[in-house]
Image (tube, grey):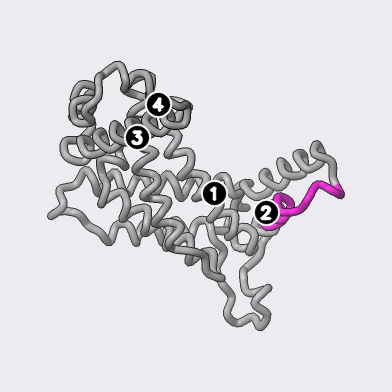
Amino acid sequence: MSEKTASELTGTTRDRLVQAAADLLSEGGRDAVSTRAVSAAAGVQAPTLYRLFGDKDGLLDAVAAYGFEQYVAGKQALGETADPVEDLRRGWDLHIEFGLSQPAFYVLMYGEVRPGKISPAAQDAAGILRGMVARVAASGRLRMSVERAAQLVGATGRGVVMELISTPPEERDLELSAIVRENTLQAIVTPIRPDLVFPAYQAVVDLPSRAVALRAALEQQPATVLTKAERGVLAEWLDRIADAPAPAGRE
């Protein structure tokens, strides 16, 4: 048997195991995904599963990645518009929809909290969210640092999905998502001033927003003017300005 053929067969076996585990997860939740049940459903011996994935946690990480691929496909189908805030709003709605339509996968990705560690699939999702928030920052409309804003959006979005998943379908208040979404956007995005003539000045720009915009622009420029160390120091200063508490009497 050639090396290529062996690799192809291994890939096929791996795919069968992941698909079998995904089907069991969708039908019966995590408790249904035992190594014995997955091996039997895929028609392979248990040692093969351990050889390919190491252990059950490795298999579950692969299944979470499989679910995440579906999520990413939906994100990519959204595309980008000229309004990064609206794109972020649409991304939120897709996230909620994915969680409610694929609750078993969602809980696998986000439900098991381990101190200082998240699943690889959840890390990839966080990277996509950070990119969407970074576009808002580059437009000059972000009130705080990209990292803090992305964490805020991610945390509130996950909280909404977990709350809705845990509620019986007939009792779910689906308007909850829109309420939390708009409150979250209000907290991180500067408002628009339609009374100003020039679009470049329509955002109500304050010092934190300026710092965030400069930080975003800094990441997009090649390191020609500042050294790596200088860029690091400047980025730290800008993040500190962006995330500084607002003065008393201001929102």
As helix, strand or loop, the secondary structure at mark 1 comes to helix
Q: Secondary structure at mark 4?
A: loop
Sequence-wise, which precedes: disc 2 or disc 1?
Answer: 1
Which span of residues is magenta-colored?
Answer: 211-225
Q: For marks 2 and 1, give the CA distance.
A: 11 Å
User: Which numbered disc, 3 or 4, marks the residue that appears first in the sequence?
Assistant: 3
The residue identified by callout 4 is 114
Question: How many numbered markers are drawn?
Answer: 4
Pair 3/4: label in front: 3
Cα separation between marks 2 and 4: 31 Å
Q: Residue at x 77, y 39 (%)?
A: 233
Q: Position of residue 218 (x, y in %)?
A: 74, 52
Tell me what residue is drawn at x 67 percent, y 73 percent: 201
Q: Residue, x 39% and y 38% (percent of image)?
A: 65
Q: Estimate the spatial distance between the alpha carbons at disc 3 and disc 2, rounded to whole Å.
A: 42 Å
Say which amino acid is labelled 2.
Answer: Ala
Q: Is residue 215 magenta?
A: yes
Pointer 1 or 3: first along the chain = 3
**54 versus 19 height, above or below:** above
**Residue located beneath label 1 in the image:** 130
Q: Position of residue 184 (x, y in %)?
A: 44, 56
> In terms of image quadrants, where is residue 232?
top right
| Placement of 169 over or under 67, stated as above or below | below
123 vs 11, left or right, is: right
Say which label, 4 or 1, has the lower sequence index: 4
What residue sits right under mark 3 in the picture? 12
Q: Which mark is residue 216?
A: 2
Tag 2 and tag 4, C-beta contact below 8 Å: no
Is residue 32 in the magenta section?
no
